[in-house]
């Protein structure tokens, strides 16, 4: 997962500026994946950007940066359909974060 425009990992961006990047989530037994923006002030809710139930590779996404000055992450979470320890609902999970800061 990457933020490619107009910043990279740990970049600085202005409020409400459009940003974009790519996301990849692949697994032989992929269950689901989601891309969210999180962090910021305590009142900022995790905001969904994209999600799916099938493999994606290099999917382009875009969203506007938040308006509040603070640090944020764009995070991809992927979960497979494997059964772990013979337990229902226990699956292999993987996440990756890319951080950025909104500067007013």
Image (cartoon, rainbow, N blue to C red):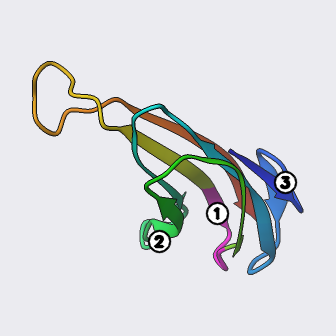
Q: Which residue is mark 3?
A: 4
**Callout 1 touching callout 3 (CB < 8 Å):** no
Tell me residue 2's x, y (percent): 74, 47
Does the magenta-highlighted stretch encompass residue 67?
Answer: yes
Which circle's residue, 1 or 2, is located before the other in the chain?
A: 2
> Secondary structure beneath disc 1?
strand
Residue at the spot 64% in from the left edge and 75% down from the top edge: 68
Q: Which residue is mark 1?
A: 70
Residue at the spot 67% in from the left edge and 80% down from the top edge: 67
Quadrant where the C terminus sits is bottom right
The span picked out in magenta is: 66-72
Discs 1/2, front: 2
Q: Which residue is mark 2?
A: 44
88 or 45: nearer the eye? Answer: 88
Question: Is 35 rendered above or below residue 27?
Answer: below
Residue sticking out furthest to the left: 87
Discs 1/3, front: 3
Question: Is 61 rendered above or below residue 64?
Answer: above
Which circle's residue, 2 or 3, is located before the other in the chain?
A: 3
CA–CA distance in space, label 1 to label 3: 20 Å
Quadrant where the N terminus sits is top right
């Amino acid at each position: 997962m990457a933020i490619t425009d107009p910043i990279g990992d740990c970049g600085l961006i202005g409020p409400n500026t459009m940003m974009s990047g790519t996301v990849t989530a692949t697994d032989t037994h992929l269950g689901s994946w989601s891309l969210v923006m999180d962090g910021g002030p305590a009142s900022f809710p995790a905001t969904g950007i994209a999600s799916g139930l099938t493999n994606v590779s290099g999917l382009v996404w875009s969203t506007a940066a938040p308006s509040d000055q603070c640090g944020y992450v764009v995070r991809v979470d992927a979960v497979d359909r494997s059964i772990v320890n013979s337990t229902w609902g226990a699956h292999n999970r993987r996440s990756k974060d890319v951080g950025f800061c909104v500067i007013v």
